[in-house]
Image (cartoon, rainbow, N blue to C red):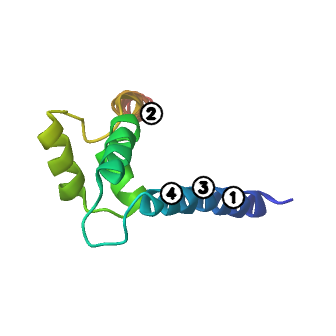
Amino acid sequence: MSKSDTRTLIKALIEDENSFKRIEFHALGSGKRRYTGEQKEYAIDKAISIGVRATERLLKVPRRTIQRWLSAKGIRVKRCPDWVYSWAYWRRRRIEKRRFWR
């Protein structure tokens, strides 16, 4: 299996998992226009674990809606998980080091 085939397979598996989570989220609903309490709890749990923006992309629910639910519960969540800040810091350091040695 070539590298591009592997990447395609991984992306397909991730998208399958995401669509399963999206279906699970919609299955918690009543089929009406409003989100149920169970759907809100599911989205809040996801937002706490993976971040608001990732939850938005995963569940296809507007970010402002998720943020409103979090505010109503008194929960403050960062834009992205903690590992992103660490990753950005070390990436910036690596780039600076590369520039220095040029």
Q: Can you say whether 34 is above or below 14 in the image?
A: below
The C terminus: image quadrant: top left
The N terminus: image quadrant: bottom right
Judge from the rendering whether residue 30 lies leftward or rightward of residue 3; answer left or right: left
Which of the two residues, 73 or 13, is positioned nearer the viewer here?
Answer: 73
**In the rendering, which numbered label is found on residue 98?**
2
Spatial CA distance of label 4 from label 1 is 26 Å
Spatial CA distance of label 3 from label 2 is 37 Å
**In the rendering, which numbered label is found on residue 17?**
3
Find out whether the residues at labels 4 and 1 contact each other: C-beta distance under 8 Å: no
Spatial CA distance of label 2 from label 1 is 28 Å
**In the rendering, which numbered label is found on residue 39?**
none
SS for callout 4: helix
Tell me the residue at 54%/57% (across/down). 18
Upstream in sequence: badge 2 or badge 1:
1
SS for callout 2: helix
Tell me the residue at 25%/42% (across/down). 79
Looking at the rendered image, the disc whose residue lies closer to the viewer, 4 or 1, is 4
Residue type at numbered disc 1:
Arg
Q: Which residue, given by chain and number where applicable, does mark 4 sit on?
A: 24
Looking at the rendered image, the disc whose residue lies closer to the viewer, 4 or 2, is 4
**In the rendering, which numbered label is found on residue 7?**
1
Spatial CA distance of label 3 from label 1 is 15 Å
